[in-house]
Image (cartoon, helix red, strand yellow):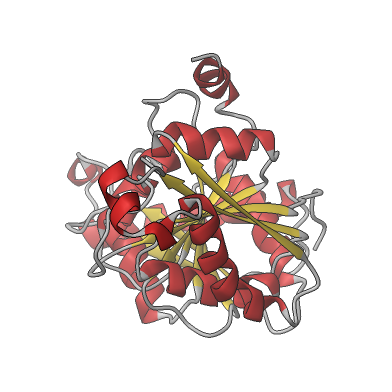
Amino acid sequence: MKTDSINYEVVVIGLDLSEMDDRIIEYIPILAQTLPLKRFIFVHIAKELELPNEVTEKYPYLLAPLDENISDGIDQKVAPHFENIDASFDIIVQEGPPLESFLRICKVKNADLMVMGRKRSLKGSGLLSGHIVRKSPASILLVTEKYNSSIQNILVPVDFSKHSTLALNLGQKLSEKENVQLKFAHIYSVPTGYSKSGKSYDEFAEIMKGHAMNDMRKFYADHNVTQEVPCEYLLSDHDGKAALINDHAHQTGVDMILIGSRGRTATSALLLGSIVEKVLMLDSDIPILIVKNKGENMGFFEALWKI
């Protein structure tokens, strides 16, 4: 497969000092086996790092700066996982508003990828991952509470848009790794008023599937996909598109979902309507990598930077 140049080298990981941090940190070696990451930056944003005077007077052994204590605690958890990873890591602990502070660090460090936790049952609010998904100028990986121990099967929902192409390009890059298999999924539907054609619902569904298959062949040709990638054509009937993607991902046992997203402004819709956001609302144990054209949200980000 011919691929465009995709460089994911600098990754910023958001931690909130909850149990979810352990899941994220344990996922790092799995991620490092798949992506050519060179630098990992672990970030915790605290709303306040100063202790009240009454506390420091009563417990003088707490006089060491809280940021240093937090940083040391993170280092003790992270360091053992880097013994077999050919990459460096840094730890940043700052005080400030979580969303703005985290995004500014990503800007300064020129992050290619952000990693955050996607909680279902664990306590803690995290680093406002939903807001960051919308506003992030870079791709973002949401790690779930549970996940498979390797990344071998990757699902890429395809709608033939340019943002779908971003996910395709990264997926092809990852599939160059040994034992990594790429799978596509395309959702099609039967248009309203099909009965006027004189054909049954099932007959028209086959017609729409045929058009989708033709579009997929053209998509392969346009993007120089020389190796046939399996594609499942999912008929959107009563279930929503997000549910179809989620159910298909679980049924086929994939280890990660790659999905393209656009982000022109702070309130812009994401690719495939609001499918990305709806997928994130569903219970799932599959990590999701939301692929963005780096810097596409930069207009919003530059405005944020000037605040």
**219 with respect to 190 (left or right):** right
Q: Residue sitting at 64 percent across and 81 percent down? A: 80
In the image, residue 230 sits, relative to residue 201, either above or below, namely below
* Residue in front for this viewpoint, 79 or 271: 79
Can the viewer see residue 189? Answer: no
Position of 87 relative to 167 (above/below): below
Q: Position of residue 49 (x, y in %)?
A: 41, 44
Residue 116 drawn at (x, y percent): 46, 56
Q: Would you place residue 23 above or below residue 58 in this image? A: below
Quadrant of res 53: top left
Is residue 207 shown left or right of residue 179? left
* Frontmost residue, 196 versus 100: 100
Q: Nearer the viewer, residue 95 or 175?
A: 95
Image quadrant in which the N terminus is located: bottom right
Q: Quadrant of residue 252?
A: bottom left
The answer to whether residue 16 is left or right of residue 106 is: left
Residue ID at (50%, 40%): 102
Report whether residue 280 is seen: yes
Where in the figure is residue 167, as x and y percent of width and height? 60, 52
Position above or below: 46 against 13: above
**Count of numbered badges drawn on the protein:** 0
Q: Residue at x 64, y 79 (%)?
A: 81
Q: Nearer the viewer, residue 273 or 39?
A: 39
Q: At which x and y percent is residue 75? A: 60, 68
